[in-house]
Amino acid sequence: MGSRRSKLEIIYDMLKSIQEKNGRIKPTHLLYKSNLSYNKMKDYLDELLKNQMILEEKTKDGTHYTLTDNGVKFINDFKRIKEFSDSFGL
């Protein structure tokens, strides 16, 4: 059995999923891609919204989450840190 993802890895996975959908995703698609329960996903979404990494848009087509500049910065910084730690075998 694989190891559990850390909080930062889950946040990265969620933001990366949004980025891969051209920076905008519906909650249901994010739920499937993030592989979390609805309640856990909601907790993470609240934190991402609070930290201004995503925006929530409610339209007649439903709710969408959009990646912000802060979210893109997190993705890039996380990748850099992961590459650094992997280079030392950590």
Image (cartoon, rainbow, N blue to C red):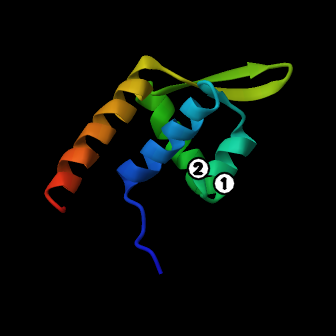
Residue at the outermost front position? 87
Residue at the outermost left position? 88
Where in the figure is residue 54, as x and y percent of width and height? 52, 27
User: Quick one: 86 or 59, which is closer to the camera?
Assistant: 86
For residue 39, which quarter of the picture?
A: bottom right
Element under disc 1? helix
Whether tag 1 and tag 2 are in contact, CB under 8 A, the answer is: yes
Mark 2 burial class by Cα count in 10 Å: few <14, some 14-19, many 20+: some
Asked whether, in this view, residue 90 is left or right of residue 47, the answer is left
Q: Amino acid at mark 2?
A: Met
Residue lying at 62% horizontally and 25% vertically, measured from the top left: 22
Residue lying at 50% horizontally and 38% vertically, measured from the top left: 16
Give the residue pinned by disc 1.
38
On screen, residue 89 above or below 17? below
Mark 1 burial class by Cα count in 10 Å: few <14, some 14-19, many 20+: few
Residue lying at 66% horizontally and 54% vertically, measured from the top left: 38
Residue lying at 39% horizontally and 23% vertically, measured from the top left: 70
Numbered tag placed on residue 41 in the rendering: 2
User: Quick one: 17 or 57, which is closer to the camera?
Assistant: 17
Asked whether, in this view, residue 59 is left or right of residue 12, the answer is right
On screen, residue 71 above or below 5? above
- Disc 1/disc 2 C-alpha distance (Å): 5 Å
Residue at the outermost bottom position? 1
On screen, residue 85 above or below 89? above
Q: Amino acid at mark 1?
A: Tyr
Numbered tag placed on residue 22 in the rendering: none
Element under disc 2? helix
Where in the figure is residue 72, as x and y percent of width and height? 42, 26
Where in the figure is residue 23, as x and y percent of width and height? 59, 25
Where in the figure is residue 80, as x and y percent of width and height? 26, 38
